[in-house]
Amino acid sequence: MPDTALEAVIGLEIHVQLSTRTKMFCGCELSFGDDPNVHTCPICLAHPGVLPVPNEEAIRYALKIGMALGCEIAPRSIFHRKNYFYPDNPKAYQISQYDIPICGAGKLGDIRITRAHLEEDAAKSIHLGDSGRIHGSGASLVDFNRGGTPLVEIVTEPDLRGAAEAAEWARLLRETVRQLGVSDVNMEEGSLRVDANVSVRPAGSTELGTKTELKNMNSFRFLQRGIEAELERQRELLGAGGTVEQETLHFDPASGELTSLRSKEEAHDYRYFPEPDLVAIAPTEALLAEARDSLPELPAARTARYEAELGLDEAQARLLAGDPEQAGYFEAVVAAVGEGAEPRVVANWVTGELTAALRASEDAERPEPGVLADLIGAVASKQVSHAGGKQVLAILVADRDADVAEVVEREGLAQMGGDDGELAGIVAAAIAGDPAAAEQIRSGNGKAIGAIVGAVMRETGGRADGGEVNRLIREQLGL
Amino acid sequence: MADLLDLTVAEAAAKIAAGEISADEYGAAWRAAAAGDELNAYLWTADGADALETDWNGDGESAPAGEGDATPYGSNAPAPAASGPLAGIPIAIKDIFTTQGIPTTAGSRILEGYRPPYTASAVRRLTAAGAHVLGKTNMDEFAMGSSNENSAYGPVLNPWDRGRVPGGSSGGSAAAVAGGLAPAALGTDTGGSIRQPASLCGIVGLKPTYGAISRFGMIAFASSLDQCGPFTRDVTDAALLLGVLQGKDPLDSTSVGIEGGIALPTREDLAGLRFGVPRELGEATLDAGVRAVFEATVARIEELGGQIVEITLPHAEHGISAYYVIAPAEASSNLARFDGVRYGLREAGDEDLIEMYERTRSEGFGAEVKRRIMLGTYALSSGYYDAYYGQAQKVRTRIAQDFDTAFAEVDFVITPTSPSVAFGLGAKTDDPLAMYLNDFFTVPMSLAGIPAIALPAGLAAPEDGGAGAPQLPVGFQIAAPAFAEQKLLDAAHALEGALGFAAAVGDALPWKGGARA
């Protein structure tokens, strides 16, 4: 029996491939999908006698990531060697950071960051054979194109309490890093790789249970499914009186299965020691200032600002903040509308009606912010109905020169007010034309009002304001 | 011919530049001398058949016939510049430096047949100054050793007495210069690998400050200690080569160069200079003949106006212990890349990858290299790191502080270079600890990263030689603060002149015919 009273405790380890021009410690260009072993040199092939020289751009990128995650930047950080034998690790050590990473403690959203450090990626092993794994393979090939690509590894505290929360937070991290312009953050191509450390414990406990490490979840959906599967497994195991073993698990997206890669007993002793071929990274004030000044407003900050200053709800604020280009447009429309409409109304137009209108046609383009602001203002002041407004918008996205007032005039979309009696007359005619619906409304079936409203809208060509039509129907039916 | 070979590098370079001698004739004379190597000093020479068979671009074919003739150094050797301070000078290169297309083994079977795709920065600096690669010299495997008996390609013989070792690990470079097979040579020093063989071969060996010369292309033994330096017949040549070799290299993050460069030394006195003699020397195990030469040299310093001051290096006695933790630890990591996957020896495994690794490394490495890899792996292991590597680094810091304290009072620290003169082949091969003690006087400077020069100071009878054994050279070591090479060379030049070692030995010098055919 799975023990559902067990609380999930999840921490993530995220590898971000930096999109620098060249590798971390040599001058070879970064690539994806090129012929094998064309982006190599004596240094990244670890020929005898070569030495690493750190990529300054990668250090800049790491500083940007650290600042975006609110990390403390180490005044002096050092590289270590992580020693292990494998053909995709040509020096037989990976140059990484160990006890003094470039970025220390930080926070993104509610989740604490332990550290973020610089390292180099391994090359790619290709095992010939059915399984694609080394066991049972007749031969293995190594493509060193990827070997030495700069990576930033970000480690969180075990602050996440569920699979969905973990996937959601990972999306926020991806968006944050993407907006820094330092990585492609593409999970399928491996420029963003998320591993999860998963454990469970009795709710309310402050101690950590034995964790397992999950690897190979190459989409947010798989990340969530992998964690869900592992939580289920651990809860079942503990519910049956068993214990969780510390091990590394491989997630198979096709089957949803988790298989053990290695247990604690098989864990490597990496024999870390300070890399003697490199000097410490000691960022100058100028380098720090440059990184700080280049930071855009990041999703978490922008979401908070939209909630606090513009009164947007969280979901709407986050949706806009996740797309800085759209957010910039939104802010321009808000400015142009001025007092004409609430920012939340503008947000609805931008994320709702405008997005739908743009999707309708390949040639559709956003109107100038001032033009959309005119339209939103006209709807807000009831010069045009909401439905009429959508018709105007469909024309605006197809014709960048169109003017709101002119379109309203030309298409006869000026809203019918309730004061001249015209709309009241149409409503009366519609009630008379559908006595059955009118009877149902009177007897308390509120839904029946739709039929009458629909008739009025057809008659007015959508120029009537829906709220006003509703009011008039109820008034005329004496409700 | 012999006249040409009697010239120092500085003299030959000046005569070539002035048109007094022909660079071609000079080069040909040295290539002929190197080809007559009876000391096993060379693993590869420019005139060997190998030169023209070299697959210089890795296309599976040798250089086209005739092309090799255009440059007598082999079409594969880095092309020397037409002019420069070393124009026309052939230099022997320790086989630990990569040379594009030219076999580079580091004295190991695991790199047998390996031809690097690039050339070491230090060698490029020499060729950019007009020098040629004369040959690649034998060495202890991966620079691990003090006698050159750890080479996979056989021991090098000492040109003063072919039954004795030349020292190590740069034994081939030292023997080539002392034996008249090269006018100068490049070596590396990790714990004494330039100074000790220079001492045992009666020539000048300079270990510069860590960071003075690029390590790019120097096959790493212990990265935080390795430093390249010259072997020469005299101090002036050492200065000439250091001036060319030193400098910051964008390919080596730890290189800094020597500010202001290096001028040829002219100093003739030692007035106003203070020389510190470690008090601990009194208790050191030292051959009586070596001690006598040291004391006579101290007296000579005073005659030149130098002042002798007693200093203390209280932690230096732990230098060997710290060194034999730090150097193997780094080596265990540096040598892990020799895995049979990409280059060099591969012994296929029948079962799996691990077997391939094990067989390749078992077959490819010699006993001393394996010993140090195991020592180093152990020292870095989880649970032992603090007790060994961490502790050794603390000792290293203390030793560096000892020197800082001493240099607040004195300009130089002086010691013998090696506790004994050259010992017999095989005398210490069964006792690694006795072998390690050869580095007793040289290791502290390596740990502190400071420059030190070994000068031939006199002759002494070997204690293991019996009555009537020929006298052998004794070295004298002068150490200076970091980057004080100019001051060090100036003082060494003055002392060298006063000692008159080469003049005193005269025609008995091996390079004057003793070992030359």
Image: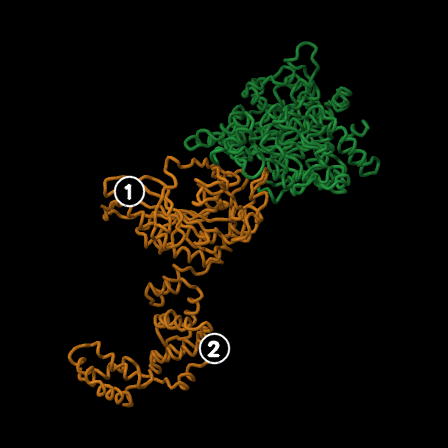
Viewer-nearest residue: B370 or B92: B370
User: Is residue A24 something one can see in this rendering?
Assistant: yes
How crowded pointer 2 is (Cα within 10 Å; few <14, some 14-19, many 20+) is rated as some
> Residue B392, relative to residue A329: is it above or below?
above
| Picture layout, residue A387 above or below residue B313 | below
Mark 1 falls within which chain? Answer: A
Residue A370 position in % (x across, y down): 44, 76
Quarter of the figure with residue B337: top right
Q: Nearer the viewer, residue B507 or B51?
A: B51
Q: Is residue B114 left or right of residue B134?
A: left
State the orange chain: A
Q: Colour of chain B?
A: green
Residue that lies at the very extreme toward the left in this rendered image:
A443
Q: Position of residue B319 (x, y in %)?
A: 53, 26
Mark 2, residue position = A400
Q: How many marks?
A: 2
Which kind of residue does numbered mark 2 sit on? Arg
Chain ID at mark 2: A
